[in-house]
Image: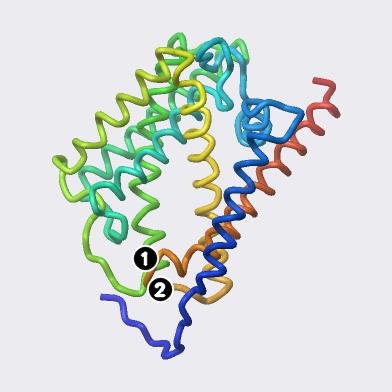
Amino acid sequence: MQQQTSSTKILPTPLWLVATMALLYLSLLAALVLLPGMSLLDRLRWLDSGICAQVPSHSFYPGGERLPLCARNTGIYLGFIVTLIMLYAIGRSRAQQLPPWPMMIVLAIGVAVLAVDGFNSFLLDLGLPHLYQPHNLLRLSTGLITGLAMGVFTHPILNRQLWRQYNEQRNLASWKALLPFLPALLICFFATASQSAYVLYPLALLSTAGLLTAVSSVNLTFIIAISKRDETFERYRELLPFFSLAVILAIGELLALAQLKLALLHTLGV
């Protein structure tokens, strides 16, 4: 069991700071939706463009509009954010133990399948011999499995860094515990595959939220380490200022990558 050696008293987060962070999030959301110029989808595509190649032929078009992320990345980040939501929904939000080894191996195989499919698609794009004809539904399905694995693997590791109180629960203790995740991932699969106009904005926002959460989680680990706040948090309210900073940095990093990609493409004359 983890031991706390520091006797430093951690002051509670004041309500005014929580309110300020909430106002910040609302302001960012309002700016994303209401600012004149580009449409909401165009802004999401630009935000995601530094991470995703956004190849038109590799993308889904609900209602005739291209999603901000390609099929594979849509699956990855949808699977990631849905997995985190489900972990909270089933009461494993602070679990600090990974699943049993057999389950981890199966999830790792799912990630390996995505790597094989991605490499096969890359060979086709280069006009080289490849194993099979790629398909967006296969890209989506392997992406969803990889997003599930990402969420399951990273969730307890981050929890170990954050929380003062040790939680010996596994986030997925058995195959039975995995069952509630399957309908959620199937809904994501069929909603995306349907390419219905009704799912355009939910998919665009959820997949981008998954990408932003993934990058923010990486930032958060560094922020917590630098601030020497490892294993000191007791409430989510205490974590909010640190996570908000991680999100702001993530937005800046994604925008910087998007600009860098644009500059590189211009340099190459693409």
Image spot of residue 226 (x, y percent)? 58, 72
For the point 41% across and 72% down, the residue is 233
Residue 75 point in image, percent of width and height: 44, 28
Q: Is residue 16 above or below residue 114?
A: below
Left or right: 231 in relation to 61: left
C-alpha span from label 2 to label 1: 7 Å
Q: Which residue is mark 2?
A: 231
Q: Position of residue 209 (x, y in %)?
A: 51, 40
Where's the C terminus, which quadrant?
A: top right
**Which residue in the structure is indicated by mark 1?**
160
Give the residue type at disc 2.
Glu
In this rendering, is residue 237 above or below 115? below
Q: Crowding near pointer 1: few (<14 within 10 Å), some, many (20+)?
A: some
Secondary structure beneath label 1: helix
Among all residues in the image, which is located at the extreme bottom? 7
Q: Are marks 2 and 1 in contact (CB under 8 Å)?
A: yes
Judged from the image, the secondary structure of the residue bearing numbered disc 2 is loop
Residue 149, x across and y down, in percent:
35, 41
**Residue in the image at 46% along x and 69% along y:** 238
42 left or right of 78 in image: right
